[in-house]
Image: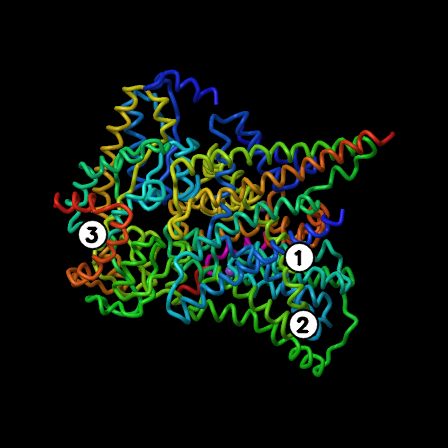
Amino acid sequence: MSTIPFLKKAQNYVFGLTILFTVLLANYAVFNRYILKQSLPWSDELLRYMFVWIVFIGAAIVYKKDQLVDLTLVTDFAKGKFALLLDLLRHLLTFLFIVMISYQSFIIMRGQMSTGEISTAMEIPVWIMTAGLLIGGCLWAVFAIFKILAALRRVFTSYD
Amino acid sequence: MALMILVFFLLFLVLRVPVVIALGLSSLVYMVLFMDISVIVISQQMISTVNTYALLAIPFFIIAGGLMEAGGISNKIINFANAAVGFFPGGLALVMIVSSMLFASMSGSGVATAAALGSILIPAMVRSGYDRDFSSALQASSAIVGPLIPPSILAVLYAVSVGVSVGDLLLAGLIPGLIMVLCFMILTIIISVKRGYKSDITFSFSRLWKTFLEAIWALLMPVIMIGGIYSGIFTPTEAAAVGCLYSLLVGLFIYKGFSISEIPNVLYKSGLLAAGVMAIVATSAAFSWVITREGLPQLLAEFFTGISSNQMVFLFTAAILLLLVGCFLDSAPAVLIMGPILAPVALEFGVDPVHFGVIVLASMCIGLITPPIGLNLFVVSGVANRPIHKIIPEIGLFFLAAIISLILIILFPALSLVLLN
Amino acid sequence: DSESASTEEEAASGNGESITLSASSGLPASNPASQAMDLMAEKIAEYTNGTVEVDVFYDNQLGDPTTLVSNVAQGTVDIVVTGNSYFSGIVPELQVFELPFLFDSYEAARASVDGPVGEKLIAMFEGTGLKPMYFWEIGFRHLANTVRPVKEPSDLEGIVLRTLPAPVQVKTWELLGAQPTPMDFSELYTALQQGVVDGTENPFSDITSANLYEVLDYISLTAHVYTPMTLAISEQTWEKLDESQREGMMRAAEEAKEFQRHLNDEEEAVSIELLKENGVTVEENPNVEAFAEIAVDAYDEFIKSHGDELIEEIRSAQ
Ligand code: NA
Ligand code: NA
C-alpha cells in the first residue's frame, strides 16, 4: 500500500511542474520577442497542445476527487437506497459519455495518423494533440469504473 | 424538436451528473436521436475549443489566482481594502466590485475575472463575516462587466463578425460598463445596510498607509499587466501568463507564502481548477454546435423580429431574445451566432450599429450569470466550493440591477455614443 | 455506421436520394467567399432539381477553419471553403502557395490553380476524406505596418511583423530583415493598436473585414503571395450522391468560383479607396524585384522536403 501515496505525490509533482513549464514558456516567448527581438514561432502551438493534455487529464483527476461542478438541488432530497441508486446512475451516465468521446477521439486520431497530418509551426503529427483527449478520457473512464463499483457495493450492502 | 436538447440537459443536471458531462451527454443523446450526423463532432469540438489560443487566458488567470491566494497576495490586498473602505457598510463587497472592474478590464473576459478574483476574494469575504452564497453571487455578477469595459475579447469578436469599427465599439462600452458597476454598488450598499454587513474597524490614516506599503507588490500586479498591454509589451492572453510568473515570484520571495518545494503542489491545485473550468468550456462548445446546426438561434430571431415595426419594441425584444440565448449559450459563440443575424435587422430599424453592438454585449454579459448555462456561476461555484443552486437565489437582485442598467443602455443611446464624438 | 456500410456496397455512386448538406467558409456573411457559397447553394438546388439542398453557415458558427477542415474530413460537415494553409497539414505540397513572388498577376495565378498544377494538387487529397472541387481565392497578400512607408526591403529593418507560424513564411520575412512574429489573428487588431507588433501581411479582405485599416498607417502593394482557398466536399458525402447530382454540384461550384473571383476583383478596387479614406498611406509601386531577389532563398525550405517540380511547372506556365 505504501506505493499508492508515493504515486499520488509523483502525479501531483508531474502535473504541477507541467503547469510551471507552460507559465515559464509563455513568459519566455514574451521575453524573446520584446527583449531579444527574436520571436518563437512554435510557442503558441506548443502551449495549445499542452493545454489539451492538461485540461482533459486534469478534468479526469477533478472527477476522481468528486470536485466537478454539479447540481445537488434535487439529489439532496433523495433518501436511503434511492439516493444510492441515483448516485450509481450518475456515474454510469458519466462513464457512458466518457467512453463515447474516448472512442471518437481514437477514430479522429486514427484518421490523423493515416493522412499524416502535421502541425503548422512545430511540424509534428497532429494526433499527438488529439491523444490528450484519448488519454484523459481513458483515465476518466477508469476512475468512473471505480466509482461505479463503489456505488454498487453501497447499494448491495445497504438495508432500508 | 431542438428544444429537446435543453430538456435532456436539465434532466442530467437534476440527476447530479457533473455540468461538464451533462452538456456533452445531452448533445450526444440529442444527436443520436434526432440528427443524421456522426457524434464524432462532440470530440472534435471539445479538442478544437481547448486548442484555441485566445482561450488560454482563462487557465492562466485561474492559475494566477491560485498563486496569489497561496502566496499571500490576497491577504495583503484585503488588508489594504479593509483599511481603505472596510469601515463602510459592505466595504469589502464594494472592494470586490471595484477590483472586478479593474481586473476585468485587464483580462477582457468575465469568466477569467470571476475565476481569478473569486478564489481570493470569496474566502476573504467569508472570513470577514459575509454570507458565502452572497459573496459568490456578488463575485459572479461583478465580473460580468469584463466584456463591456475595454479591452474586450467579446467586443472584438462582435465588431469583426458584424463589420463595425472595433475601436468605436471598444470605446462605446466604457460608460455602459461603468453604469453597470454603479448599479451593483448601489444595490450592494442597500443589501449590506439591510443585512447588517458592517465592519468592526474604524478608519485610520496610519493603518491605511501601513497596509498600503505592505500591499504595494500586490497592487503593482494590475499596474504591470495593464501597463504591459498598453505599452505593447504583451497581448492580453500573454498578460495572464505574466501575471502567473509575477505572483509566483512575489509569493516566493517577497510575501514568502510558499517555498520552492511547495510550488508544484500549489500549481497542481490551481491547475486542476483551471482544467475543470476549461472542460466545461469544451463541452459547452459541442452543445452550442448542436444548437446552431439545428437552427435554433435563427428560428428565435425570426420569431422575435416579426413582432413589431417600432424601433424601441425591436430593441427590447432583441434584448430579451439575447438574454434567452445567453441562458443557454456561452457568450463568445452566442455573439458569433446572434450578431450577424440581428445586426442587419437593427440597421433596417435605423439603430446605430455601434449602439446596437453595446446592447448585444451588455445582454451577453448578463448571460454569464443566468442559469442553466452561466459560466460565471459554474466558475464561482467551483472556486467557492458551493453548489450552484445555493448561489442562484442570491443572484436574483444582481440580475435585476444588471437588467436596469441594460434598460438605461437601450433607452439612452448617448451613453454608448457620447465618447465617440 | 450502417449507412457507410451500405454506400460501400454500392461502390461508385450513391442512390441519389434527396439530401441536405451543411457548408461553411468560417467567414462573415458579407465576405466574397460566403456570398459565393450562397450562390453555390442556390445553383446546386437548381441543377440537382432540388434533390440537394445546402444550408450555409457563416463565421465560426460550425467551428473555426481548422475544425471545419477536420469536420469535413470526418464527414460531420459536408462542404468547406477556406484558406490553403488550413489544408497544408494534410497535403504539405500546398505550401508551394506560401512561396513569395511565385505569381506576377491574377491571370497567372488563376490559370495555374485551374490547370494541371491544380489537378495535381487535388489528386494528392486521395484517401484523406476530403475531395477538393475547385480552388477559390483569398487573393494577393500585401505588406502593411504602423511605422514607416516601405518601398525597399531595407525599410523593413526592425519591424515586428505578424505572420503565420509556417516555416516558409518565417524564413521569408527573416531574410527580408523583419522580425517575423506568429500571432493568432484574433489578437492582431489590439496587438497592432498597442504596438505588440508593428505590421502584418494580409490580403485586402482580411484588412477590411477585421477593420485593420483603423490601426494601420502604411501599406505597400507588394502582392508577395497569392493565397488560394480550397473548396472541398467530404468524401463520405460525395459517395452518397449519384452521377447527375455530382455533375450539378460541380457545375454550381465552378460558377460560384467565377463569381467569387469577380467579387474579389470588385472588392480590391473598393478596398484601396477605403484604406486611403482612413488615412492609410498606400505605396503603389514598391521595389518588388528587390524583395523577390532576397526572398527567393526561402524556396530552399520548400524544395528541401518537396522538390522543385511544382515550382518549375508553375514558373514555366507563366
Ligand atoms: Na474588459
Ligand atoms: Na447564461
Quadrant assignment for the C terminus of chain B: bottom left
Lower position in the chain sequence, tag 2 or tag 1: 1
Could you tell me residue B40's position as x and y percent? 49, 33
Q: Is residue B404 magenta?
A: yes
Amino acid type at image mark 2: Lys
How far apart are the alpha carbons under marks 2 and 1?
30 Å
Mark 3 vs mark 2, foreground winner is: 2
* Quadrant in the rendering for residue A64: top right
Amino acid type at image mark 1: Leu
Q: Chain of mark 1?
A: B
Amino acid type at image mark 3: Ala
Write the residue at 37% across / 22% down. Answer: C240
How far apart are the alpha carbons under marks 3 and 2?
62 Å
Residue corresponding to mark 2: B256
Q: Are marks 3 and 1 in contact (CB under 8 Å)?
A: no
Viewer-closest of B144 and B62: B62
Residue corresponding to mark 3: C269
Q: Is residue B300 visible?
A: no
Viewer-closest of C221 and C58: C221
* Residue B266 tag number: none
Q: Chain of mark 2?
A: B
Q: Is residue B392 visible?
A: yes
How far apart are the alpha carbons under marks 3 and 1?
52 Å
Q: Are marks 3 and 2 on the same chain?
A: no
